[in-house]
Amino acid sequence: MARLSWAARLYIGVVVAAAAVLIVRGPFGDFAWWREVAVLGLLLVVFESTATLLRPRQLAWSPNSSATLAAAVLTGPVGAAIVGACTMFGMRRGPSLAQRAFNTGMMALSAYLAGRVFVALHGHVGVPTNHSFPGLIGPFAVAAVVHVVTNHVLLAGVLLLTSGRDAAGRRAPVGMSVRLVASDLGYGAFGLLIAALWSVVGLFAPVLILIPLFVARWAVAQIVEQQRAYEATVGALCQAVETKDFYTRGHSDRVSRGSVMIAREIGMRGERVEAIRYAGMLHDVGKLGVPTRVLQKNGKLTEEEYAAIQLHPMRGLDIVREIGFLDEALAGIMHHHERIDGRGYPMGLAGDEIPEFARVLAVADAFDSMTSNRSYRGARPVAEAIAELRKWAGTQFDPAFVDAFVAAIKREGWHRPEPPVFAADDLAVLTAQDHDDPGAPLRVIDSF
Amino acid sequence: MAERRHELRRFPWVRDSGLLLLVVAAGVVLVASVAQTAVEGLTDPRIAVAFGVLIAFGEVLRLNLPGDRETAPIAMAGALAYALLIKVGVHPVHHSAEQVVTITAIGMIVGALPHLAVGRPAKVSGMASRLLCVACVAFIFRPLAGNGAVVTHWGLAFSLMAALTVVALLLEAVLTALMRVDEQRARFRVALVDEMRVQLPLGAAVGASALLIAFAAEVMGLAALAVFTAPLLVTQVAFRRYAGIRATYLQTVRALAKVTEIGGYVEPGHSERVSRLAVAIGRELGIHEPQLLELEYAALMHDIGQLSLADPIPGGATVLASRQDQQRIAELGADVIQQAQVLGSVAEIVRRQNEPYRGLEVAHEGFSARTGHAAGPPGRIGDSTPSGPPLSSRIIKAANAFDDLVGSSLDPGRAAAAVQQLRLDTASEYDPDAVEALSRVVNRRSVML
């Protein structure tokens, strides 16, 4: 966040200034709810200090909206804005000064707007009583929607201005945002409960609410934790598979990254991007089922040996079949060696018969093979590999995905693997030919 | 596990007397309550219907927690709230405990119908224990709900309700633990602690929600139910995703443990059998669930180091390989697992899976040259009091050796001979406790076959 663009600074400045003006302007003449504001402000500080970090980007989640919405009901728009502004006292170490300022402004602004809407819809400000219900529910629901939508629109704005990739028109992971909006709305409902319980249990209301909210937070944290554990484990196991061959180390990881680049470029949904990431990681796992001596054979392959190599996508499928992936990922692993002209393996599918995931994987797979060192040749430059991809587009690769990949590489670049360093005691052996390399197809002994 | 389940299905009533008792108890309470309610008629039918709908809705959205635990948090919160209800709006409510049980049961059954329709049978034990807990709270609290002191002092009502909720959730944990003792041959104390650990977060949320619904209904009326469903739903979604990811994780480890089989390094089914056996032994020895999960992971991946060998060991039977080779496989496998940082202790278990249980120094002087390995665990190098490998490693060592000797054979004689052979080596190699537990597990299996 150190290098904020002028546009981003301006944006954050406007948000903070608007919030400050709205709070200072008051009116405070007959404002009699300082106690409520103090308690809810404290509640918000607790929420903010215990926010859960979400993974894909630097976002944090906390049920703040339940405190600000309760304030909107109990104290009106200005009180809600003050409670929202308590975000700045959050004791979380992550955010920079600019982030903290923006978060404060954002929460205060959305709380104020929600409060205004609540009042405009004739919602009664103050501690609700038996007669307030069910009339209070409608205005509250609208206010909650306004709060959450304002919050997310402001957030999307700052993300657009601060992250280069989003500015370039890439789609943000929409699936995640939808989930976040839904959960914010859900926890917003707690706001009404805090307000309602105020008349029964008074100041004790926020304390009671904390229990289920902390449990929810625990669950969210567990999800993030498990996801990280999962990824690390799959990555490590893929590397284990790769230890058999020095030259292909890191191949799975790079194919995975390349496939994700293509998937994002063509605007795949977040969930499918995740799936293709795992498919890329695991696409060659079936090589384990091919006898080592065949993989390492220096010279022409016999028909049987070639058949054994052609079987590796099926072996891969055997291994990963029981994992609860999207079926698409499985299809991708099984068909990543099909060719558009129908001369690939294992099934000889052609054109659109080949699953989309497989066509994506095929491009990234071949590209990484070409730009890596092999025992029979050095790594080829990226430009040369792109030319090679273009040459085979339409016969071996899907031209649309080749174009997408080239565009993504032009923008984001491509990290080629380091040339392998040979350690004396390394167990790995060298592969003499690479089944992924389109420039040097496997040599098969002619049976005639 | 598959064979065991099969056995359970063949003689469900012989093996599961506990389940039978539970279901009968719940059934008796239910029949008595329904009869009583039928005689007296429903009080406050509108409220009863509202809570019944909430319970049914929650039952539709029931949830599987890690370790094959079925819960229905929203239904449970709704039912407990109905039992703890004092006033709706300004009107005090007077429904009886019998009515609470009846409404809860009807809600549960209606909610279970969609599951049955798509072929997911309800777990009778789960439903029965949930019903018993609700009944317990209802029969204690309903007579008190009309009491003047409880109605006027929210502090008294609150403490009473909180205490009852805690008791009810504890009762559910005890009942579920008893079921598990019956089903999985776990020890009761271990099962209870595990149960409470898994259920604690969700149980706390359920209890607090029940209290909140009961109190909020005083102000908001029945609208409290609708408003409350939103946050509970979101929490439940979070839990569902958490459980889903955990399940995928285990599936993936299981799938990737198969690469050694498909690569021809080990006999097909070896990793799966060793892990099943190891988990059974672990349970027999009273290992808690989190460690049991680590044991399962470690057992599944115990041969992963073989991937780094140029040539597969003939037949993959590591028990016949030289100690150096075995140790090398273990070290390589542990290095692989270590890279997945989160599985730190799993790596340690795999690394030490071949060590004799008394520790390397005492058992094999000739081999002690190897102990200076840099990756060795601290405390082993130059330590005057040698410490043996962790219990999980000792279990895997025994299970692995047993499976290498017996394989997929189901011949009881061969199994007994293998156990005997391991027993002869308990002086230094195999942990006598692990071997005895193994023997009990194997005996049980052959009796059941």
Image: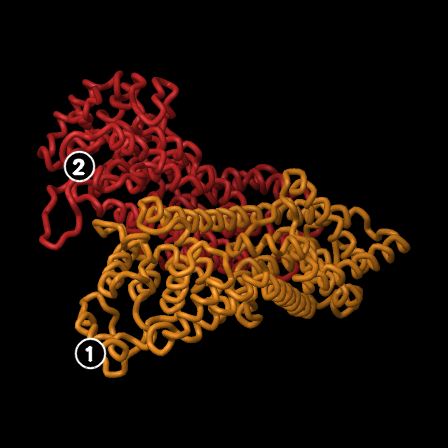
Residue B382: image tag: 1
Seen from the viewer's position, the closer of residues B415 and B240 is B415
Query: As drawn, is A86 to the left or to the right of A371?
Result: right
Give the image location of residue B304, x and y in percent: 31, 53
* In the foreground, A339 or A231: A339
Farthest residue in the bottom direction? B384
Closer to us: mark 1 or mark 2?
Answer: 2
Relative to A343, say whether A248 is above or below: below
Q: Which chain is red?
A: A
For the residues tagged 1 and 2, is the chain the same?
no
Q: Secondary structure at mark 1?
A: loop
Foreground residue among A330 and A8: A330
Task: Using residue B233 as the reference point, say whether residue B75 is left or right of it.
Answer: right
Q: Quadrant of the C terminus of chain B?
A: bottom right
Q: Which chain is the one coloured orange?
A: B
Find disc 2 in the rendering and name its residue.
A297
Q: Which quadrant holds residue A155? A: top left
Query: Can residue B261 be seen in this snapshot?
Result: yes
